[in-house]
Image: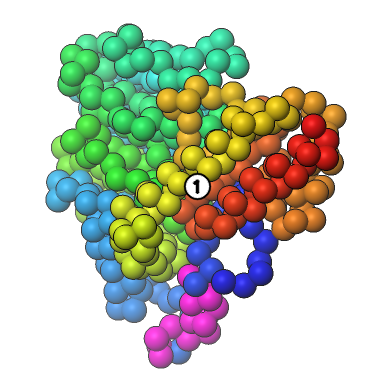
Amino acid sequence: MTSRPFNFSAGPAALPEEVLTQVAQEMLDWHGSGMSVMEMSHRGREFISIAEAAEADLRDLLQVPANFRILFMQGGGLGENAIVPMNLSQRNGSGKVDVVVTGSWSKKSAQEAQRYADVHIAATNAPEGQRHIPVAAEWQLRPDAAYVHVCSNETIDGLEFHELPDLKALGSDAPLVIDCSSHQLSRPIDWSRVGLAFGGAQKNIGPAGLTLVYVRDDLLGHALPICPSAFDYKTVAEAQSMYNTPPTFGIYVAGLVFKWLQRFGYAGKTGLAAIEQRNIDKAQLLYAALDGSNLFENRVAANCRSRMNVPFYLRDERLNDAFLAGARERGLLQLKGHKSVGGMRASIYNAMPLEGVQALTAYLRDFEAQHG
Protein backbone atom coordinates (compact mmCIF):
# COMPACT_ATOMS: atom_id res chain seq x y z
CA MET A 1 0.00 0.00 0.00
CA THR A 2 1.07 3.57 -0.68
CA SER A 3 0.49 6.55 1.56
CA ARG A 4 -2.77 7.50 -0.14
CA PRO A 5 -5.38 9.15 2.10
CA PHE A 6 -8.21 7.08 3.54
CA ASN A 7 -11.36 7.83 1.52
CA PHE A 8 -14.59 7.47 3.51
CA SER A 9 -16.82 8.60 0.64
CA ALA A 10 -20.31 7.10 0.49
CA GLY A 11 -20.04 6.64 -3.27
CA PRO A 12 -18.48 6.74 -5.70
CA ALA A 13 -16.21 5.16 -3.18
CA ALA A 14 -12.72 3.82 -2.67
CA LEU A 15 -11.53 0.89 -4.76
CA PRO A 16 -8.82 -1.63 -3.86
CA GLU A 17 -5.47 -0.09 -4.68
CA GLU A 18 -4.18 -3.18 -6.45
CA VAL A 19 -7.23 -3.08 -8.73
CA LEU A 20 -6.55 0.56 -9.60
CA THR A 21 -2.94 -0.34 -10.29
CA GLN A 22 -3.96 -3.11 -12.66
CA VAL A 23 -6.41 -0.81 -14.45
CA ALA A 24 -3.60 1.69 -14.97
CA GLN A 25 -1.26 -0.99 -16.30
CA GLU A 26 -3.85 -2.26 -18.78
CA MET A 27 -5.25 1.12 -19.79
CA LEU A 28 -3.58 1.37 -23.21
CA ASP A 29 -3.37 -2.32 -24.07
CA TRP A 30 -5.58 -5.01 -22.57
CA HIS A 31 -3.79 -8.39 -22.65
CA GLY A 32 -1.97 -7.66 -25.89
CA SER A 33 -5.13 -6.78 -27.79
CA GLY A 34 -3.77 -3.38 -28.78
CA MET A 35 -6.90 -1.76 -27.34
CA SER A 36 -8.04 -0.21 -24.11
CA VAL A 37 -11.17 -1.84 -22.70
CA MET A 38 -12.88 1.51 -23.26
CA GLU A 39 -12.21 1.14 -27.00
CA MET A 40 -13.57 -2.39 -27.40
CA SER A 41 -16.80 -3.39 -29.08
CA HIS A 42 -19.16 -4.84 -26.51
CA ARG A 43 -19.87 -7.62 -29.01
CA GLY A 44 -16.21 -8.41 -29.70
CA ARG A 45 -14.62 -11.59 -28.37
CA GLU A 46 -12.29 -9.64 -26.07
CA PHE A 47 -15.03 -7.89 -24.16
CA ILE A 48 -17.37 -10.88 -24.22
CA SER A 49 -14.66 -12.83 -22.38
CA ILE A 50 -14.39 -10.03 -19.79
CA ALA A 51 -18.15 -9.95 -19.22
CA GLU A 52 -18.52 -13.71 -19.01
CA ALA A 53 -15.72 -14.01 -16.48
CA ALA A 54 -17.16 -11.18 -14.38
CA GLU A 55 -20.59 -12.79 -14.27
CA ALA A 56 -19.18 -16.21 -13.41
CA ASP A 57 -17.02 -14.80 -10.60
CA LEU A 58 -19.89 -12.75 -9.18
CA ARG A 59 -22.17 -15.78 -9.24
CA ASP A 60 -19.47 -17.76 -7.44
CA LEU A 61 -18.81 -15.11 -4.78
CA LEU A 62 -22.46 -14.59 -3.87
CA GLN A 63 -23.51 -18.18 -4.55
CA VAL A 64 -26.28 -16.93 -6.84
CA PRO A 65 -28.60 -19.86 -7.65
CA ALA A 66 -28.98 -21.11 -11.20
CA ASN A 67 -32.59 -19.89 -11.38
CA PHE A 68 -31.46 -16.27 -10.99
CA ARG A 69 -30.24 -14.14 -13.87
CA ILE A 70 -27.48 -11.60 -13.31
CA LEU A 71 -28.00 -8.49 -15.40
CA PHE A 72 -25.42 -5.76 -16.06
CA MET A 73 -27.51 -2.63 -16.48
CA GLN A 74 -27.40 1.16 -16.29
CA GLY A 75 -29.50 3.71 -14.45
CA GLY A 76 -28.21 3.25 -10.92
CA GLY A 77 -30.22 2.40 -7.84
CA LEU A 78 -32.40 5.46 -8.38
CA GLY A 79 -33.27 4.25 -11.86
CA GLU A 80 -34.17 0.81 -10.52
CA ASN A 81 -36.77 2.47 -8.31
CA ALA A 82 -38.73 2.94 -11.53
CA ILE A 83 -37.49 -0.09 -13.47
CA VAL A 84 -38.54 -2.57 -10.76
CA PRO A 85 -42.22 -1.52 -10.59
CA MET A 86 -42.35 -1.28 -14.38
CA ASN A 87 -41.27 -4.94 -14.47
CA LEU A 88 -42.99 -6.44 -11.44
CA SER A 89 -46.02 -4.42 -10.32
CA GLN A 90 -48.36 -6.34 -12.65
CA ARG A 91 -46.71 -9.69 -11.99
CA ASN A 92 -49.94 -11.00 -10.47
CA GLY A 93 -52.28 -8.46 -12.05
CA SER A 94 -52.74 -6.48 -8.84
CA GLY A 95 -50.55 -3.47 -9.50
CA LYS A 96 -49.90 -3.33 -5.75
CA VAL A 97 -46.50 -2.75 -4.16
CA ASP A 98 -45.76 -2.86 -0.42
CA VAL A 99 -42.75 -0.86 0.79
CA VAL A 100 -41.06 -0.85 4.19
CA VAL A 101 -39.66 2.65 4.75
CA THR A 102 -36.58 2.65 6.98
CA GLY A 103 -34.75 5.72 5.67
CA SER A 104 -34.07 8.07 2.80
CA TRP A 105 -33.61 5.49 0.04
CA SER A 106 -36.66 3.34 0.77
CA LYS A 107 -38.67 6.55 0.98
CA LYS A 108 -37.44 7.49 -2.50
CA SER A 109 -38.31 3.99 -3.71
CA ALA A 110 -41.89 4.33 -2.46
CA GLN A 111 -42.31 7.75 -4.03
CA GLU A 112 -41.01 6.62 -7.41
CA ALA A 113 -43.06 3.42 -7.46
CA GLN A 114 -46.22 5.50 -6.98
CA ARG A 115 -45.81 6.63 -10.60
CA TYR A 116 -46.46 3.06 -11.77
CA ALA A 117 -48.26 1.20 -9.00
CA ASP A 118 -50.57 1.30 -6.00
CA VAL A 119 -48.04 1.74 -3.20
CA HIS A 120 -48.73 0.88 0.42
CA ILE A 121 -46.31 1.70 3.25
CA ALA A 122 -46.28 -1.60 5.12
CA ALA A 123 -44.15 -0.22 7.96
CA THR A 124 -42.08 2.85 8.72
CA ASN A 125 -39.65 4.04 11.36
CA ALA A 126 -41.30 7.48 11.40
CA PRO A 127 -41.39 9.84 13.20
CA GLU A 128 -38.17 11.31 11.91
CA GLY A 129 -35.17 10.73 14.11
CA GLN A 130 -36.12 7.27 15.41
CA ARG A 131 -33.57 5.27 13.47
CA HIS A 132 -34.54 1.63 13.72
CA ILE A 133 -36.02 -1.14 11.60
CA PRO A 134 -39.65 -1.99 12.37
CA VAL A 135 -40.19 -5.52 13.67
CA ALA A 136 -41.18 -7.70 10.70
CA ALA A 137 -44.02 -9.38 12.58
CA GLU A 138 -45.72 -5.98 12.81
CA TRP A 139 -45.57 -5.16 9.10
CA GLN A 140 -48.95 -4.61 7.46
CA LEU A 141 -48.54 -6.63 4.27
CA ARG A 142 -51.33 -6.91 1.71
CA PRO A 143 -52.19 -10.48 0.63
CA ASP A 144 -52.22 -9.55 -3.07
CA ALA A 145 -49.09 -7.38 -3.25
CA ALA A 146 -47.05 -7.99 -6.39
CA TYR A 147 -43.86 -7.63 -4.34
CA VAL A 148 -42.48 -6.23 -1.09
CA HIS A 149 -39.61 -3.74 -1.26
CA VAL A 150 -36.97 -3.07 1.40
CA CYS A 151 -33.69 -1.19 1.31
CA SER A 152 -31.45 -3.70 3.05
CA ASN A 153 -28.84 -1.04 3.87
CA GLU A 154 -29.75 2.64 4.16
CA THR A 155 -26.66 4.50 2.99
CA ILE A 156 -27.69 7.90 4.36
CA ASP A 157 -29.29 6.82 7.62
CA GLY A 158 -26.93 4.01 8.55
CA LEU A 159 -29.40 1.15 9.10
CA GLU A 160 -28.89 -2.41 7.87
CA PHE A 161 -31.04 -5.54 7.84
CA HIS A 162 -28.64 -8.05 9.35
CA GLU A 163 -31.21 -10.74 8.56
CA LEU A 164 -33.58 -10.47 5.62
CA PRO A 165 -37.27 -10.91 6.44
CA ASP A 166 -38.87 -14.27 5.73
CA LEU A 167 -42.05 -13.20 3.95
CA LYS A 168 -43.44 -16.73 3.86
CA ALA A 169 -43.22 -16.86 7.66
CA LEU A 170 -45.17 -13.60 7.69
CA GLY A 171 -47.92 -15.18 5.57
CA SER A 172 -46.98 -13.45 2.32
CA ASP A 173 -46.38 -15.15 -1.02
CA ALA A 174 -44.98 -11.97 -2.57
CA PRO A 175 -41.35 -11.94 -3.70
CA LEU A 176 -39.00 -9.79 -1.66
CA VAL A 177 -37.16 -7.06 -3.58
CA ILE A 178 -34.05 -5.65 -1.92
CA ASP A 179 -32.09 -2.54 -2.76
CA CYS A 180 -28.66 -3.74 -1.65
CA SER A 181 -26.67 -0.98 -3.37
CA SER A 182 -24.46 -0.08 -0.44
CA HIS A 183 -23.71 -3.50 0.99
CA GLN A 184 -23.75 -5.98 -1.88
CA LEU A 185 -20.67 -8.20 -1.75
CA SER A 186 -19.97 -7.18 1.86
CA ARG A 187 -21.69 -10.33 3.14
CA PRO A 188 -23.70 -13.30 1.81
CA ILE A 189 -27.31 -12.95 0.61
CA ASP A 190 -29.99 -15.46 1.62
CA TRP A 191 -31.42 -16.09 -1.85
CA SER A 192 -34.16 -18.32 -0.45
CA ARG A 193 -35.80 -15.14 0.86
CA VAL A 194 -35.22 -12.93 -2.20
CA GLY A 195 -36.97 -12.62 -5.54
CA LEU A 196 -34.97 -9.71 -6.91
CA ALA A 197 -31.97 -7.73 -5.70
CA PHE A 198 -30.39 -4.68 -7.26
CA GLY A 199 -27.60 -2.26 -6.53
CA GLY A 200 -25.39 0.37 -8.03
CA ALA A 201 -21.77 -0.71 -8.32
CA GLN A 202 -20.17 2.47 -7.00
CA LYS A 203 -19.96 1.39 -3.35
CA ASN A 204 -18.20 -1.98 -3.16
CA ILE A 205 -17.78 -3.04 -6.77
CA GLY A 206 -16.54 -0.43 -9.22
CA PRO A 207 -17.06 2.95 -10.84
CA ALA A 208 -20.41 4.69 -11.12
CA GLY A 209 -22.48 3.75 -14.14
CA LEU A 210 -22.88 0.00 -13.65
CA THR A 211 -25.96 -1.44 -11.94
CA LEU A 212 -26.28 -5.09 -10.94
CA VAL A 213 -29.66 -6.81 -11.00
CA TYR A 214 -30.23 -10.36 -9.73
CA VAL A 215 -33.68 -11.55 -10.80
CA ARG A 216 -35.38 -14.91 -10.37
CA ASP A 217 -36.48 -16.55 -13.61
CA ASP A 218 -40.19 -16.61 -12.76
CA LEU A 219 -40.20 -12.81 -12.37
CA LEU A 220 -39.20 -12.21 -15.99
CA GLY A 221 -41.74 -11.35 -18.66
CA HIS A 222 -44.18 -9.17 -16.71
CA ALA A 223 -43.12 -5.69 -17.82
CA LEU A 224 -45.66 -2.92 -18.29
CA PRO A 225 -46.25 -1.79 -21.91
CA ILE A 226 -44.67 1.57 -21.04
CA CYS A 227 -41.42 -0.08 -19.90
CA PRO A 228 -38.59 0.81 -22.30
CA SER A 229 -37.27 -2.32 -24.00
CA ALA A 230 -33.75 -1.62 -22.71
CA PHE A 231 -35.12 -1.85 -19.15
CA ASP A 232 -37.31 -4.92 -19.65
CA TYR A 233 -35.59 -7.58 -17.55
CA LYS A 234 -36.70 -10.37 -19.91
CA THR A 235 -35.23 -8.57 -22.93
CA VAL A 236 -31.99 -7.82 -21.11
CA ALA A 237 -31.69 -11.39 -19.83
CA GLU A 238 -32.30 -12.93 -23.25
CA ALA A 239 -29.59 -10.71 -24.73
CA GLN A 240 -27.08 -11.58 -21.96
CA SER A 241 -27.05 -7.89 -20.95
CA MET A 242 -25.98 -6.85 -24.46
CA TYR A 243 -29.33 -5.58 -25.79
CA ASN A 244 -28.23 -2.04 -24.97
CA THR A 245 -24.52 -1.14 -25.04
CA PRO A 246 -23.53 -2.02 -21.48
CA PRO A 247 -21.20 0.05 -19.26
CA THR A 248 -18.16 -1.82 -20.53
CA PHE A 249 -15.46 -0.13 -18.47
CA GLY A 250 -17.52 -0.51 -15.30
CA ILE A 251 -17.98 -4.23 -15.97
CA TYR A 252 -14.24 -4.63 -16.57
CA VAL A 253 -13.30 -2.92 -13.28
CA ALA A 254 -15.99 -4.87 -11.44
CA GLY A 255 -14.49 -8.08 -12.79
CA LEU A 256 -11.10 -7.13 -11.36
CA VAL A 257 -12.72 -6.41 -8.00
CA PHE A 258 -14.38 -9.85 -8.08
CA LYS A 259 -10.97 -11.46 -8.66
CA TRP A 260 -9.54 -9.40 -5.78
CA LEU A 261 -12.33 -10.59 -3.50
CA GLN A 262 -11.84 -14.22 -4.47
CA ARG A 263 -8.21 -14.16 -3.37
CA PHE A 264 -8.76 -11.88 -0.36
CA GLY A 265 -7.66 -13.36 2.95
CA TYR A 266 -8.28 -12.23 6.52
CA ALA A 267 -8.43 -13.90 9.93
CA GLY A 268 -7.82 -17.33 8.45
CA LYS A 269 -10.67 -16.98 5.97
CA THR A 270 -10.82 -16.28 2.25
CA GLY A 271 -13.20 -14.68 -0.21
CA LEU A 272 -16.56 -13.33 0.91
CA ALA A 273 -16.23 -14.87 4.38
CA ALA A 274 -12.96 -13.00 4.85
CA ILE A 275 -14.28 -9.64 3.71
CA GLU A 276 -17.38 -10.04 5.88
CA GLN A 277 -15.23 -10.74 8.94
CA ARG A 278 -13.06 -7.69 8.26
CA ASN A 279 -16.19 -5.57 7.79
CA ILE A 280 -17.52 -6.80 11.14
CA ASP A 281 -14.24 -5.95 12.85
CA LYS A 282 -14.07 -2.49 11.29
CA ALA A 283 -17.63 -1.65 12.27
CA GLN A 284 -17.23 -2.91 15.84
CA LEU A 285 -14.08 -0.85 16.26
CA LEU A 286 -15.74 2.36 15.07
CA TYR A 287 -19.01 1.91 16.95
CA ALA A 288 -17.08 1.13 20.15
CA ALA A 289 -15.19 4.40 19.79
CA LEU A 290 -18.40 6.34 19.27
CA ASP A 291 -20.26 4.64 22.12
CA GLY A 292 -17.36 5.30 24.48
CA SER A 293 -17.26 9.00 23.64
CA ASN A 294 -18.78 11.98 25.42
CA LEU A 295 -18.38 14.20 22.35
CA PHE A 296 -19.55 11.94 19.49
CA GLU A 297 -22.72 9.90 19.15
CA ASN A 298 -24.40 7.47 16.76
CA ARG A 299 -28.21 7.63 16.69
CA VAL A 300 -29.07 4.21 15.27
CA ALA A 301 -30.47 1.33 17.32
CA ALA A 302 -27.64 -1.08 18.10
CA ASN A 303 -29.38 -4.10 16.54
CA CYS A 304 -29.59 -2.56 13.08
CA ARG A 305 -26.45 -0.48 12.73
CA SER A 306 -24.91 -0.59 9.29
CA ARG A 307 -21.49 -2.16 8.82
CA MET A 308 -20.97 -0.03 5.72
CA ASN A 309 -22.22 3.47 6.54
CA VAL A 310 -21.70 4.91 10.00
CA PRO A 311 -23.35 8.30 10.59
CA PHE A 312 -22.29 10.15 13.71
CA TYR A 313 -22.70 13.57 15.27
CA LEU A 314 -20.73 15.92 17.45
CA ARG A 315 -22.79 16.86 20.48
CA ASP A 316 -21.47 20.39 20.01
CA GLU A 317 -22.13 21.05 16.32
CA ARG A 318 -20.10 24.26 16.45
CA LEU A 319 -17.07 21.96 16.22
CA ASN A 320 -18.11 20.40 12.91
CA ASP A 321 -15.89 22.53 10.68
CA ALA A 322 -12.87 22.11 12.95
CA PHE A 323 -13.41 18.35 12.98
CA LEU A 324 -13.55 18.11 9.19
CA ALA A 325 -10.52 20.36 8.76
CA GLY A 326 -8.47 18.27 11.18
CA ALA A 327 -9.59 15.09 9.45
CA ARG A 328 -8.36 16.37 6.08
CA GLU A 329 -5.00 17.24 7.60
CA ARG A 330 -4.69 13.62 8.72
CA GLY A 331 -5.65 12.24 5.32
CA LEU A 332 -9.16 11.21 6.40
CA LEU A 333 -11.39 12.32 3.53
CA GLN A 334 -15.12 12.64 2.76
CA LEU A 335 -16.42 12.46 6.32
CA LYS A 336 -19.14 15.10 6.02
CA GLY A 337 -22.63 13.66 6.46
CA HIS A 338 -25.35 13.78 3.84
CA LYS A 339 -26.95 17.21 3.54
CA SER A 340 -30.38 15.81 4.44
CA VAL A 341 -29.30 14.57 7.88
CA GLY A 342 -26.16 16.58 8.67
CA GLY A 343 -23.42 15.49 10.99
CA MET A 344 -20.69 13.12 9.83
CA ARG A 345 -20.62 9.80 8.03
CA ALA A 346 -17.85 7.26 7.61
CA SER A 347 -18.48 4.79 4.80
CA ILE A 348 -16.26 1.80 5.42
CA TYR A 349 -16.83 -0.37 2.39
CA ASN A 350 -14.84 -3.46 1.41
CA ALA A 351 -11.87 -1.50 0.07
CA MET A 352 -11.38 0.41 3.33
CA PRO A 353 -8.59 -1.36 5.23
CA LEU A 354 -8.71 -1.90 8.96
CA GLU A 355 -5.88 0.63 9.23
CA GLY A 356 -8.20 3.33 7.90
CA VAL A 357 -10.72 2.76 10.68
CA GLN A 358 -7.91 2.61 13.23
CA ALA A 359 -6.70 5.99 11.97
CA LEU A 360 -10.20 7.43 12.25
CA THR A 361 -10.78 6.16 15.79
CA ALA A 362 -7.40 7.54 16.85
CA TYR A 363 -8.44 10.92 15.46
CA LEU A 364 -11.78 10.76 17.30
CA ARG A 365 -9.90 10.22 20.57
CA ASP A 366 -7.39 12.98 19.89
CA PHE A 367 -10.08 15.46 18.84
CA GLU A 368 -12.13 14.74 21.95
CA ALA A 369 -9.08 15.13 24.17
CA GLN A 370 -8.52 18.57 22.64
CA HIS A 371 -12.14 19.79 22.42
CA GLY A 372 -14.22 17.60 24.72
Placement of the N terminus among the 4 image quadrants:
bottom right
Q: Is residue 61 left or right of residue 30?
A: left
What x and y, as percent, mark residue 113?
43, 25
Element marked by disc 1: helix
State the residue in front, 119 or 116.
119
Q: Residues within 10 Å of mark 1 (few under 14, many from 20)?
A: many
Residue 107 lies in magenta, yes or no? Answer: no
Residue 32 lies in magenta, yes or no? Answer: yes
- Residue range (magenta): 19-33
Task: Report the residue at 54% width, 24% height from top.
Answer: 300
State the residue in front, 275 or 226.
275
What x and y, as percent, mark residue 51?
32, 67
State the residue in front, 154 or 145.
154
Quadrant in the picture for residue 367: top right
What x and y, as percent, mark residue 178?
35, 34
Residue 66 seen in render: yes
User: Where is mark 1, residue-wise?
Assistant: 282
Quadrant in the picture for residue 240: bottom left
Above or below 27: residue 92: above
Please state which amino acid type lies under the numbered disc 1: Lys
Task: Report the residue at 60% width, 51% height from top.
Answer: 358
Above or below 101: residue 293: below
What x and y, as percent, mark residue 52?
27, 67
